[in-house]
Image (cartoon, rainbow, N blue to C red):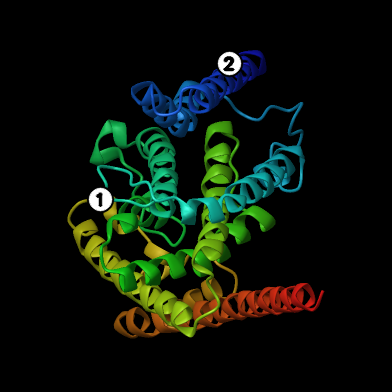
Amino acid sequence: MSNLVGYSIVALFVIVMGLLLLLKVYLQTYHPGKYWYIERPIKYLMILGPMFFLFAIGERWHFGENFLPSKNPDDLAWGPFHLGWLFAMVIAIIVVSSGVKADKANTKRYVFGQLNKIDFTVFQFGVLLFGIELYKQLIFLNLYEGLANYHWYGFPLQFCSIPIFLYPLTPFIKNEKIKEAIYSFISIFNLIGGLAVMILATGVYTLQVSISIHTMIWHGVMVVVAFYLINAYKIGTKWRHYLGAVTVLFCLIVLAQLTNVLFHYIGMKFPGPGDFDGFFISPWIDRRNMPILGDIRANMIAGGVPTLIIALVFPHIYFVIFSLTGLLIYYLFHFIWKDVEKNKKEKALKTNTL
């Protein structure tokens, strides 16, 4: 695909999304609730818009020599493409987080009365991620050609893939303690994963424009939703937020390792699933996908440590390191919230004094 065609599709996408947004705002402003049967399809067309865009450009559009002379996708980091997405992420954080107060006060129920506004917002982000992941799984990972040709390394059970399940499903959980624990996990650990990719941006790009866009949308949304829930639930104000988050983390690590074991033995009979490396903790794969942790696993395998020991010990090392990192994030927001509360009290005291 030529740049002319690619940029034309981008322009068309922006125009269509802009018109849909204007129509939605017009209906909500001048005919609130009257044309809901038009507003709802518009809303979901906008949410699924990125998916349609990715399918439109497909695998045909690549970063050319004019944009990327080195032809090395890692050189996209801190270039115009990367900086543009960072800017978009910051704007999205501000816009979405600024609506938290109104969303908490909103008494309207959504999805057949099942969700409040906070849950519905998370659900909508889940629909967005499901849409763009559908493109990645079908086209980039070859699922459309059948399981025999599927690239199993991309099976969506990685640390950063978890939002595809958590965002659309967690809002429907009735048990508030479980829901808060998962939202705490999203706020703390999804923030870590999302920021790591959005800021470092090394080894995450490809020459395919569509997948590089997918990466930026995906991890940018992880950060946006994390900040939204931090504000909505005041994550960091209660110790149970951290305990709930690490409990969910531990459960997901166990699930990932059980899946690694299952896929490894399936892969011994059917080629493909054995390539899966969930959470990058498989005891059979020595790829160095993560700094420090990747080296530890590779050295354990190279040193002849029994597979069973690696399968049991390495996930615990992974859990401890991530838990400590999560603890830093928790305390960061803990002190931020304390400072906010202190300023509120001082302001209230001054007002009463006057």
Residue at the image position 39 percent from the left and 51 percent from the top: 107
Dot 1 surroundings within 10 Å: few (below 14), some, or many (20 or more)?
A: some
- Residue 50 location (% of width, % of height): 49, 31
Q: Is the Cβ of the residue at disc 1 closer than 8 Å to that at disc 2?
A: no
Q: Is residue 328 above or below residue 210?
A: below
Q: Is residue 225 above or below residue 146?
A: below
Q: Nearer the viewer, mark 1 or mark 2?
A: 2
The amino acid on which the numbered mark 1 sits, given as a three-letter code, is Pro
Residue at the image position 40 percent from the left and 77 percent from the top: 244
Q: Is residue 289 above or below residue 111?
A: below
- Residue 167 location (% of width, % of height): 39, 53
Q: Quadrant of the C terminus?
A: bottom right
The amino acid on which the numbered mark 2 sits, given as a three-letter code, is Leu
Q: Quadrant of the N terminus?
A: top right
Which residue, given by chain and number where applicable, does mark 2 sit on? 12
Of labels 1 and 2, earlier in sequence is 2
Residue at the image position 70 percent from the left and 80 percent from the top: 342
- Residue 48 location (% of width, % of height): 43, 32
Dot 2 surroundings within 10 Å: few (below 14), some, or many (20 or more)?
A: few
User: Label 1 vs label 2: CA separation?
Assistant: 42 Å
Q: Is residue 202 visible?
A: no
Q: Nearer the viewer, residue 26 or 183?
A: 26
Q: Secondary structure at mark 2?
A: helix
Q: What count of labels does the image hold?
A: 2
- Residue 109 location (% of width, % of height): 33, 47
Q: Nearer the viewer, residue 197 or 296?
A: 197
Quadrant of the rendered image containing residue 178: bottom left
Q: Is residue 226 visible?
A: yes
Which residue, given by chain and number where applicable, does mark 1 sit on? 271
Q: Secondary structure at mark 1?
A: loop
Residue at the image position 46 percent from the left and 22 percent from the top: 31
